[in-house]
Image: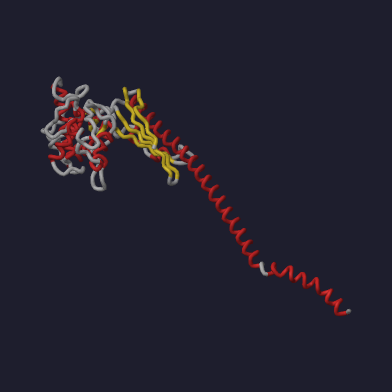
Amino acid sequence: MTGARCKARTLPTQLRQVVLAPWRNQRGMALLITVMILSLLVVVTLGYYKTTWQKYVASHNHKVNTQLKAIAGSAVQLGYAFLQYDGGANSTDSFFDLWAAIKDEDLRDLFPTGTAHLEIIDLSGRLQINSLVRQKGGGGKKGLSGRNRSLENETRAILLRLLLSDSFAISNELQAQQLVDALVDWLDADDLESDYGAENSYYRSLDPPYGCKNGPVEYIEELLLVKGITPELLFGTATTKGLADYLTVFGDNGKININTASRLILKSLDPLMNDDLTDRLEAFRRDVRNAAQLADPEWYKNIGGWPGDIVIYENLLTTESSYFQINGAGRYDNLVKRVTAVVERVDRAQVTMLWRKVE
């Protein structure tokens, strides 16, 4: 009886052991499941953090980009105002004018977030590509006055000398002449090829074919369609300059502002010009003591010891500019927003926006 009673007492204990035994064997599995759940929570948390951070960065960048666009646009408007004010203040454009003397330091404290950059380029100091063919609607063969014919020839000669300045991706004089003739044929209204030029018969044979413009160039990139003009020639390489920095599609009267033209343009104005004479021109127009003389397009003749046999064609020169490019930029850390505009000064007190681009 006593044995039976003891057996009855121990039975629940044995039963519990039987029931709990499988769970004791699953302790490792429970730990694994716990670790997996914790890992999942970590992954979800990190994913949420990453998504939230990306949205924050995107929102922040959008905010900064909007601010920088406003800063760049404001810089362009400042340039516009400078040109309008300066036009009313004097009738001559030179490097001593307000639009040319503005520096980034002058704009540093204008905006609480980001900094502004402003650059004004006088496009009237460049060679007008459309002046290679002077008459309305092109057509360089008939009906051109003697003055316009002379200006046309002088402009083509300047372009040829510019191409042969050893600054561009040009290998020889023949290639330079081919480019000048191809540009003339691209601009003139007829379908008659110049000696080394190209008209519709050439362009229609290309793959894909297209027609010769036979009219004025509207955008500088359009020159890439002209026979012989490559991206390397137009925009430069690591070792050569880009022709685009010395040409403009704005204006067709052939006038070049001698006060603001680049050194390469100055050197190309006459076949007898050399580096020494170019240096003297540059030094004279940069000397504030000569500022008053810069109103006369022939001020170069006042340079002491200037060679009498170098007389630049008078109808080429001006000291009053009509077209300007305004480059505005807003910067914050590594972010940059740019706005570019081209304006025309119709008269000394009125400036008109021709086009505007946001990058």
Q: Residue at x 50, y 44 (%)?
A: 58
| Left or right side of 63 for 260 | left
| Coordinates of residue 327 in the picture (x, y in percent) | 36, 36
Looking at this rendering, what residue extends furthest in the right direction? 1
Total of numbered circles in the picture? 0
| Left or right side of 132 for 339 | right
In terms of image quadrants, where is residue 21? bottom right
Q: In this rendered view, identify the residue nearer to me: 285 or 193.
A: 193
Q: In which quarter of the image is the C terminus?
A: top left
| Coordinates of residue 17 in the picture (x, y in percent) | 75, 71
| Coordinates of residue 225 in the picture (x, y in percent) | 24, 35
In terms of image quadrants, where is residue 71? top left
- Report if residue 37 is visible in the image: yes
Q: In this rendered view, identify the residue nearer to me: 357 or 314.
A: 357
- Report if residue 283 is visible in the image: no
Q: Which residue is drawn at 42% across and 36% down?
A: 72
The relative height of residue 351 versus residue 169 in the rendered view (above or below) is above
Q: In which quarter of the image is the N terminus?
A: bottom right
| Coordinates of residue 182 in the picture (x, y in percent) | 17, 33
Q: In this rendered view, identify the residue nearer to me: 23 or 49.
A: 23
The colour scheme of the drawn protein is secondary structure
